Image: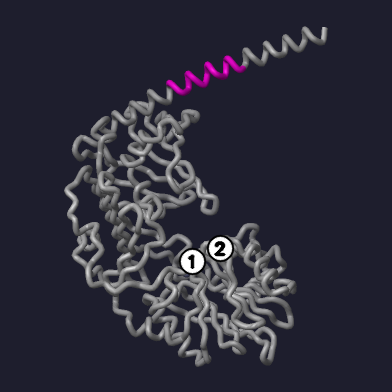
Amino acid sequence: MKRLFSIALALLFASTALADDHEGAEEGAKLKELIARVVDAYGGESLTGITGYRIAEKFLTLTVGQSHSPTLQEIAESSQVLNMDMANKRSAYDTWFYGRDGGFQGNTISDGETGTAVNHRTKKIGEAGNADPYVFAGGTMRTSDAVLVYELSKTADKATLGEDAMYQNRKHHVVTMPFPSSPDLNLYIDAETFLVSKMLRNNPQLGALDYVFSDYRKDKGITYAGSTQFSIAGAPNLISKQRKIEFNPQFAEATFAVPEGFEAESERTDTSEMAATKISDRVYHVGQGNAYTLFIDTPTGLVATGGYAGLANRLEYFREQSDNFKPLSYQVVTHHHSDHIGGLAEALSAGAKLITVENNVAALTAGVDPAPSTADFLLANNRMTLGDGRNRVEIYEVSTSHSSGYLVVYVPASKTIFIADHLGSPFVSGTPVATQGTVTMLAALDELGIDIDRISTAHSARIFSMKEMRDSVREYSANECLNDRPVCALAAN
Ligand SMILES: [Zn+2]
């Protein structure tokens, strides 16, 4: 009886497996046909056979979570030109951003193995953070439906078919595809036109990222959207003003050439591993990548500043390095920007109070999950001192072009300050490049009249000297899009 039963069971499972296989094969065939139709809608072999493309686009950029004051959001502009010469494995990416801190021009050139960052204003070249165009220009590639379909055609065997969905009252097929150095992308494909209406990507911190395509047009028989609107968690973030894509364009050699006669920057700081800089027995600067925290030991407990996500890991590393296991009593919040409050929930669960200014309380309450209560905040009220004598920490409220209510932390015993977003460099040495933020922060620090030797920051492992900050500001000139590269023509339109 038992034996018969197991045979029956085995047969049952076998037939289920067969049904699954059958269904799987059917799904696979359906997906294959769908991808073929999408590729056809975008130009078929004209698209799959491209050897290069150029995307030139300009957006209005809403300063979501990055405004000067939490009560008013500004509108900035960003322009990009991406030259992808796949036939010769080279790429060039030009960017121009213009906002309240002035203009920023960026240029990365890659031959596939070496990436070079070119600063046309300071006439310096340095090693780029990455040589892979999918990393340094992936954001621009993802704004193009035609590029997504081209990538889909290359990775069709790794794509999956989801449930059909209604989008803007039209039936859509949903295909999930891998994309290099990104979470998977979900393409919403119109069931009648087989054009991609939108792409959805989920960011673990920010939520749903929607790329909505419209104004389809053609170049060399290839369809592409002339407009892409980008939203974060349902709120508009990038508003398309201009975009043009050329397929198999004539590339000028100069586009990919590192300019001659530019001065070389020093090597890049290796920030791949968590590291601590011991500034004194009581003060440690800890972090990795672009996220650093300053930990200061005081008689009443630890004071920390620098609130990027991952704060708990940095605290743990500080404890390992310093053998200091005092509780985290205070977390000084530099400013209200969303990226700098990502670790505040971790500070709260470590038992810290958040030191901030009144104007930022609402933004922090809304932006930290779970939301802090009134009792979690301590207001700096222009200035505040924690501890006394040589063991004191001073906190000063300043206003700069970057942020209105901004807190600078100062440790008088080691003449150290901590600031975020006003000074930085990815390189081991050399004068950091100033922004309007650097200029206005230096003016604010001079006004405080405090004696500063060391400047630690939220984004650089490097500790700067006051002389380096002054040199940086001295070399500052108002940013204009300087070069004759096409991104400047785009910006001027
Ligand atoms: Zn900021």
Q: Residue at x 49, y 45 (%)?
A: 183
Which percent across, then down, holds residue 19? 57, 15
Disc 1 and disc 2: Cα gap in Å? 8 Å
Q: Residue at x 23, y 33 (%)?
A: 46
Secondary structure beneath dot 2 equals loop
User: Can residue 493 be spotted in the picture?
Assistant: no
- Dividing the picture into quadrants, the one containing residue 428 is bottom left
Please rate how many residues cluster around mark 1, counting C-alpha atoms within 10 Å: few if below 14, some from 14 to 19, many from 20.
few
The label on residue 273 is 2
Specify whether residue 368 is in view: yes
Query: Which quadrant would the C terminus be assigned to in this image?
Result: bottom left
Q: Is residue 306 left or right of residue 73?
A: right
* Amino acid of disc 2: Glu
Residue 31 highlighted magenta (yes or no): no
Which range of residues does the magenta coloring cover? 17-29
| Quadrant, the N terminus | top right
Magenta segment: does it hold 22?
Answer: yes
Q: Do the numbered discs 1 and 2 sit on residues whose CB atoms are within 8 Å?
A: yes
Q: Which residue is mark 1?
A: 270
From the image, give the main secondary structure of the stretch colored magenta. Answer: helix
Q: Secondary structure at mark 1?
A: loop
Residue 68 place in picture, x, y as percent? 44, 70
